[in-house]
Structure formats: structure tokens, C-alpha cells
Image: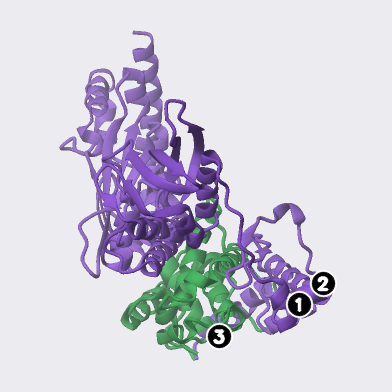
Amino acid sequence: MTSLENSLRAYAEFLEEQSIDVLPDHTPLNDRLTEPSEGDVIMIDDLEKSPDPNTKERVARSGRVRTMFAAAAIVVVALAAAVLLWPESTTEVDTAENSADLEVTEVELPTEPLDVVERYYEFFAAGDLDGLGILIADDAQINDNWLEYTKEQWLRRAAYYVGQGATHEDRICELDPSSGAVATVVCSHGTLTAAARPTGETVPIERRITVLDGRILVLGEVVRAPDWITVSASFEQWASWAVGEPPDNTECCEWDSIDDALAGGQAIARLVAEWESDIETFGCELVDRPCTAETGLGRSFVVARGEWDGAAVAELIGESAEVDELATTRDDYLAVAEFERAIGRTFEIIECKTGASTSERIGRWCSYFGETDWSRALGDRPERGVFDLVFVEGEIVEISDSPQLVDTNAWTVFEAWLRDNHADDVATMIDLDGSKPLLTTESIALWEQHTSEFVAEVSTG
Amino acid sequence: MTDTALAHQPFATFVNEAGPRIRRALVAAFGPEIGTEAAADAMSIAWERWDLISGRENPAGYVWGIGRNRALKRMGRKRRLFPTPEPGREPWIEPGLPAAIGTLSEKQRTAVLLTSGYGWTFREVAELMDVAVSTVQAHVERGMAKLRNELGVNDDES
């Protein structure tokens, strides 16, 4: 073994000592859960409510695993305490005697039309499809903008929405004063489906519901946004990437049963949860399509450019990446950052979306609005540009920028001003064919100095 | 246990099996401070979303990816990732090694420290990072060559 390898092994031991207190690998998790040590302090202010996937209890979340373990310990202790302290009758619900006590008694249904409709929405919110079935008359007439439904079909449609956890937002129901002997209730609300949850975008609905003898006889639904898509485009594109095909958003009639429709809605909900998880994990925005690790890294690239953090930019790039912009190699980005700082170049990211990709090479187009001190002084609008990035195994291996800085109006004006006012510096600042700024220490100082002069001159007319 | 075999395991098993590996991989890439914090973040997210993550083909790789993403965000302008051990420490560590490690790319740092430092096989690194074994080998070879060059170490020294 070489001395270098010996040093690496010793240094790895040193790194292990530096980090081992945070995530001890020699202590079984169960010990930590049942016997939290004195050092496990929870910062209550750091806790966020989030569902535990196994227990459905609320558990703590913090930035440190030590805290996470301690939080988990609290959940375990709390669960244990709950079991021990729970009233005896509750813990014995499975006994025959107690089962008799808990037998479902027939629920008294309202007869007032408005109350019937309220109950309908309550049953929907509770996921009580049987309840909905009781409220709707067997021969009810049901329709929306496009279709007529049998009761069974309508219940399948409801099951699909119940399964995905859809909600009715801002609902208002009122008795139609113009209705005659048979009362009609008019309801308006926004339906929020699972896929629309991240955006909060609801589809506006109006329903006219006729009630007689406590049963819904007629339910007419009008969708006020008939071109609204059931599943958001962003989610659909992510789902196409994640599962190979868009999710089945059949609402009613192709489901074989209410159970099938319910399962279909639940499948949508699971996919949406995974999508939301990826958005947070990879740092995407909803406009990004699809949200993957590469999308998040593409955003990081543009953000680091905007922060003039050349080292952070270089971290994202492979050693032998092909670069076609201000930089030509990864190592140029420290100088590029200094140059862009000198000219006040900023990037406001618009979106990152799928670029040309193969199974090995993942393309992302990250578009932005770019400005410089020159363009701001000239009053030019921010110019839209696109970084075309190609990733292989999580690293950027190709970068191009379009349009390039030298193709912008601000560059043209500034370059002409420079040649008129500082002709002797041009050879230091711009390459021979005028296609690129030179990025030496000397030239960057000149870029900064002359940019300030240019801005001052333009600003004073 | 392989990463694939960790799928659908209880979270406690995952923490015991994969947690230290994920943390070491992140420390190798981003240093002990950012690496351990990022590992903690990643495991915290994994705990919350275990029902989703446990079904993935490579849960450890997925959680490592979360940690890497978090570490890149945490780095900001912090550039001195690898601390220098105190002088006179045993066993001896080449004094210029931390700075030299800092000159490697993230992938090279990870591959070199995990294989030569922690003793992982190329395959173990490849499984966690979800890359080809040959890719890991290339990162190690380039990284070691760069380290030797930076430190002026003779390749044949033994």
C-alpha cells in the first residue's frame, strides 16, 4: 500500500471521527428509540408536523438525525403510553360484547332540501360512498356539461374523486327561491383534485340539485371551465416520465365498479404524493417538466450563475465537459463569475424542461431572463435565454447558451462605445474576432471599470 | 445487503444498513460538516416518506441523491470542505492531503475517499451512486493521479 493510500485511510478515520456523533452507526436504532440518551435534545421550535408513513401519527422533523431519532423515540413512547392509558373499553373493541355496543344504528337522514344537500357534501368529505348512495334516488337524473349518468355511474365518479382526496372549496349552497313545489338547491364550489393540489387551482362547478322526500331526484352539474384539464399538465408530464404513461383520469364510465374507481383515485393520489415528494427533494418548481434530479441540478446551475458563484457552478460540471458559451472548460467558470459580476449580469430563471435526451444522456433546457448593467442602463427589456444542459450520471457534460451574451443588443451597444472611447483596451478585453470577452484578471478589471463609466454616461444622457 | 435488497425493508433496518454508508458517501463528497448535515436531512426526509422511498428500486441511492442535492444547496460559498487534522496525529496523514482532496471534482473525491479511504469496492460505490463500475474506476484513477500530482507522491512508493 502506498503512503498516499495510507494517508487516505487515516484521513477517512479522521473524517469518521468528525461526523460520527451525528449519525452513530454502532448504536442499534431500536436502542435509540427505546432508550434515548441524555444528549438527544429536541428543539421544539424546529419541529414540523408531518405524517409518519407507518403509524399515521405526527412526528418531528429537524435537520439533524439525532433529533429525528429522538423524535421517533417520542412517537414510540407516546404510542406505548396511548396503548397503556387508553380506556379499557376502547382497547377491547374486538370482543363480541363491545362489538354489540358499537353496532351501526341507522342514521336519521334529513328531509329539508338544504339539509339533504349539506349531508351529501358531508358524506363526500367523509368518503362515505354508501351514504351518497342512500341520498341519491335510484332513478335520479344526473348530468354534467357532457354526459348523463346513472346513479351507479355517478357514484363511480364520486368514488374516483373520493379516492384521490378531492375537496370542494368555497362551497355555497342556497335554496333556489324560484323553485316551485319541488325544492331546488343551487350550489357553487371549486373542486380541488389531487393533481391540482400543489397549485391550488380549482375547477369552478355549479350544481342544481332537486330534492324530494329527503332524496336527490335531479343533479345537474355545470363545469364553468369546460376546457379545464382534470390532471394538471405539470403532473401529467411528470407521471409520463415516472410511470411511462399518463395516469388514467377516467372519471366515471369506464370503471368496472365503485371499488375500481376508488382504487383509481387512490392510485392518482399516490402518484401525486410521489410527484410532490420529488418537487421538494430535487428543488423543482411546478413549471419544471418533468421534475427529476437533473432538473433540480439545472436550476442550481442557473442560480449559481446568478449568484456569481463560479465554484458552485464548476461543482455541477464534469471534468471534461464540452462547453460552448463564455466559458470553454469547467475551469473557466471562476473567471466567468468574476466577469459577470463586473458587468452585473443576472439570471432570473423561468423554467427547466426536457431537452434532447437519450437513455444515457439527459437533456434539460433551463430558460432565464438575463440582464446586465449595460441593458439596465439602456432600458432594454430582460432578454430571454436558454442554457442547454446535458447530464450524464448527475454531472453536466455539455453546456451551451443561446443567445450568447455577444448576440444581445446591450453587448453591441457597449462594444461600439468601448471601441469609440477606449480603443486601446479593446485588444485586452475582447478576442480578435470580437466573438468573446477575454477573461484575464487584467481584462476583468477593465470590464468593471468601463461598465461603470458606460452606465454613468448613458444615465446622464 | 445490496441496495436493491433494501427495498421494502422497515425504516429501522434501512437506517442501520444504509445510513452509515450514505453519510460516509456524503462526507467524502462534501466534508464532515456539510456531509453529516446533508445526511441528516436526507434521512429525515426518508423517514417522512418511507412509504414512497421504500418502494424504489434503490432506496439507498435515492436517499443519497436527496443528501447530495441538499449538500449542494448548503455549500453556497463555503469552499473549505475538508478540515486539516491536528499536527502530530497518529497515524500520520500527509499534511497537504485535505487541500489536495479539495481540488478534486465531487465525483472524484467521493470515489477516491470511499474506495481508498473507507475500503469500499468499486461495485459498492457504483450501486450507491447509481453509476457504472467503470465510471467509478475512472473517477478513482483520475482522482488518484491528480492527488499524486498535487502532493508530489511517487506512485511506486510502498
Seen from this angle, which residue lies furthest front? Answer: A181
* Three-letter residue code for mark 3: Asn
Seen from this angle, which residue lies furthest left? Answer: A433
Return the chain for callout 1.
A
> Which residue matches tag 3?
A6
* Three-letter residue code for mark 1: Thr
Return the chain for callout 2.
A
Circle nearer the viewer, 3 or 1: 1
Give the alpha-carbon distance from disc 1 to disc 2, as whole Å. 7 Å
Return the chain for callout 3.
A
What SS does tag 2 mark? loop
Dots 1, 2 in contact, CB < 8 A:
yes
Q: Residue A19's spot in the image, x, y percent? A: 65, 71
Q: Is residue A65 left or right of residue A403?
A: right
> Which residue matches tag 2?
A87
A140 and A59: which is toward the camera: A140
* Three-letter residue code for mark 2: Pro
What SS does tag 1 mark? helix
Q: How packed is label 3: few (under 14 Cα within 10 Å), some, or many (20 or more)?
A: some
> Which residue matches tag 1?
A91
